Image (cartoon, rainbow, N blue to C red):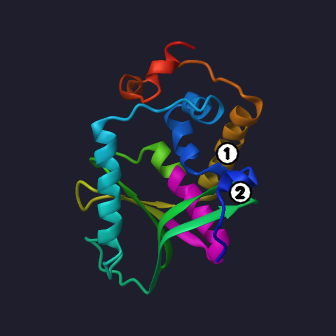
Amino acid sequence: MRAWSLSGEDFNLIPVTLVKEYHVCPRIVYFREVVHAPERTTESMHQGREIHEKISNLENRRTTLLAERKQKVKRRWDSIKAYSFNIGVYGVIDCVIETETGFHLVEHKSGTVPKKPRPNHVYQAAAYAMLAEEILGIIIRDIILDYSSGKRGFTIPLTEEIRKHVHWTISKVRKIVDEEWLPPFRLKRYCAVCGYRWICMKC
């Protein structure tokens, strides 16, 4: 397994979290990576990070795929620090598990379960899955979004279409960072609670 000993930034790679941020709002990528503006965090953000850590610790002790599933886990890898020059990203993979049906990427999420998978969560998890495939030499069958608020989550096949969209997203993130390009403003529901609202409204 290949894991980094230095920061992924030393290799001119982008963090996988930017794949998620791009699908929330492309301007977040600019403020975070180009301007290096501080993000104003809220109490819910702090709680979310604490919940994520608790979920990870709980899942590490499980011997089945997830709480509501009956598939036995044959092997698992947790909190994998890794990078890929081919994909152009680095990050910490929550969990990869092997069952009798194949390999699965598990991404832990805090908060309530949405009615349908959120694109930012799907593509972030897919990027981690692609990274895991390269460093572990395996093929990921699907990605599992595991939410803290209950046993229900989402299992999403890792299709070629999703893979292509991850590469597309990474290219868009790279354009913003390399060209220091500020995407145009588009009002979204998330704007009211965004940690970069304080600077976004000035640009």
Query: Does the magenta run of residues contain 134?
Result: yes
Q: Is residue 173 above or below residue 155?
A: above
Amino acid tagged 1: Ile
Residue at x 36% of width, y 27% of height = 193
* Residue 123, horizontal then vertical, whole percent: 54, 50
Q: Is residue 141 above or below residue 53?
A: below
The residue under label 2 is: 87
* Residue 130, horizontal then vertical, whole percent: 62, 62
Real-space Cα distance between discs 2 and 1?
8 Å
Amino acid tagged 2: Ile
Query: Does the magenta run of residues contain 122?
Result: no
How crowded pointer 2 is (Cα within 10 Å; few <14, some 14-19, many 20+) is rated as some
Mark 2: which secondary structure?
loop
In the displayed structure image, the side of residue 123 where residue 66 appears, left or right: left
Which one is nearer the viewer's eye here, 154 or 195?
195
In the displayed structure image, the side of residue 58 where residue 101 appears, left or right: right
Mark 1: which secondary structure?
helix
Q: Is residue 114 visible?
A: no
* Residue 46, horizontal then vertical, whole percent: 32, 44
Q: Quadrant of the C terminus?
A: top right
Q: In the rendered structure, which segment of residues is drawn in magenta?
A: 124-142
Rendered image: mark on residue 170: 1
Which of the 4 image quadrants contains residue 50? bottom left
Q: Residue furthest left?
A: 150
